[in-house]
Image (tube, rainbow, N blue to C red):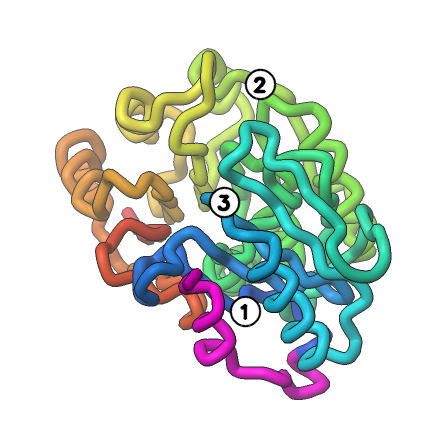
């Protein structure tokens, strides 16, 4: 019998009406806290439930799970299944409507989501507390957002009254979504800048544009031809003095399962010793981790 049949007992449903307005993870098996379910996640992206599988499951078990979820969340209009064990991460519509483009809300901010067009949807829900931290820390700060993707951190920084934000990414498509994310939040675009750059060839440009008061660095673990986190993260840390202000703050993110928080702490001690670790931000409680392989978010100050 598939362990998937045991999953409903770990879900707290139905959610309160106000909670249903918020995008959130409903189940996180990737942290190995639930036996036999490390390959499953379930997200609520109102009005869509997205089930993600990292290994194959019988369609009969998926159907049972979809019917259960529909019975408990009455406002759901679509149940979709993503096959992340396949290279492109295709998505099937298994119940309800074919919804591919939507705007979700997390806390007081809005974000564009795309389903079925890429492996990632456009927003990493596990970074919610990190975005909240950035919003609280950004008042009158000049912010540099590296590996900005669709600029979720930038939206949070402007909501927190940042003086300016410079978003850097190699994907024009991601930066275009970032522009849309700022617009749907009715934010002033003259404070926000977007540049398609290879970060590792642009340190001189950052120096000219700086100094910055707050750095956000959230690199992919591995991106063929552009990023290898073990090799490349130290390249950024050793150049901090070139573009960061004397009393600056860093938000350093690490999402490589094989690396623990000491990877960042040790490299900071070696390459940027005048910075002190002041805080570690944990993801929302639903992201239970028993092997310390999940997202790490460390805050340093100089």
Identify whether 272 is placed above or below 16.
Answer: above
Q: Is residue 153 left or right of residue 92?
A: left
Circle 2 sits in a helix, a strand or a loop, which is it? loop
Query: In the image, which residues are magenta?
Result: 1-19
Q: CA distance from mark 1 to mark 2?
A: 35 Å
User: Real-space Cα distance between discs 1 and 3?
Assistant: 20 Å
Sooner in the amino-acid sequence: mark 3 or mark 2: 3
Q: Nearer the viewer, residue 246 or 109?
A: 109
Tag count: 3
Q: Horizontal and vertical percent for residue 26?
A: 54, 69
Quarter where residue 69 is shown: bottom right
Give percent across and percent down for residue 39. Answer: 42, 51
Of 118 and 180, the residue lying toward us: 118
Q: Quadrant of residue 44?
A: bottom right
Closer to the observer: label 1 or label 3? 3
Callouts 1 and 2 close, C-beta under 8 Å: no
Neighbours of disc 3 within 10 Å: few (<14), some (14-19), many (20+): few
Of badges 3 and 2, nearer the viewer stands 3
Left or right relative to 221: residue 199: right
Residue underneath mark 3: 56
Circle 1 sits in a helix, a strand or a loop, which is it?
strand
Tell me the tag on residue 197: 2
Residue 166 shows up from this direction = no
Which residue appears at 22% of the width and 56% of the height?
291
Residue designated by label 1: 26
Sort mark 1 into few (<14), some (14-19) or many (20+) by Cα contacts within 10 Å.
some
């Amino acid at each position: 019998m598939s362990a998937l049949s045991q999953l409903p007992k770990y879900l707290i449903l139905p959610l309160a009406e106000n909670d249903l307005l918020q995008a959130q993870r409903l189940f996180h098996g990737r942290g190995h806290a639930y036996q036999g379910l490390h390959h499953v996640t379930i997200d609520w992206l109102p009005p869509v439930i997205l089930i993600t599988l990292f290994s194959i499951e019988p369609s009969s078990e998926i159907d049972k799970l979809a019917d259960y979820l529909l019975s408990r969340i009455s406002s759901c209009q679509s149940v979709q299944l993503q096959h992340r064990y396949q290279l492109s991460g295709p998505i099937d519509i298994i119940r309800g409507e074919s919804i591919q483009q939507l705007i979700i809300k997390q806390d007081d901010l809005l974000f564009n989501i795309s389903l079925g067009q890429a492996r990632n949807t456009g927003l990493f829900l596990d970074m919610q507390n990190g975005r909240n931290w950035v919003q609280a820390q950004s008042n009158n700060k000049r912010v540099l957002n590296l590996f900005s993707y669709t600029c979720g951190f930038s939206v949070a920084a402007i909501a927190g009254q940042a003086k300016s934000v410079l978003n850097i990414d190699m994907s024009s498509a991601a930066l275009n979504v970032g522009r849309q994310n700022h617009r749907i939040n009715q934010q002033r675009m003259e404070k926000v800048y977007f540049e398609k750059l290879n970060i590792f060839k642009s340190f001189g440009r950052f120096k000219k544009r700086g100094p910055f008061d707050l750095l956000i660095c959230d690199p992919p673990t591995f991106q063929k031809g552009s990023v290898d986190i073990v090799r490349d993260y130290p390249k950024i840390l050793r150049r901090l003095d070139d573009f960061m202000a004397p009393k600056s703050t860093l938000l350093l993110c690490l999402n490589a399962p094989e690396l623990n928080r000491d990877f960042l702490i040790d490299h900071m001690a070696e390459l940027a010793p005048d910075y002190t670790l002041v805080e570690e931000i944990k993801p929302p409680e639903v992201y239970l981790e028993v092997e310390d392989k999940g997202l790490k978010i460390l805050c340093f100050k100089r």
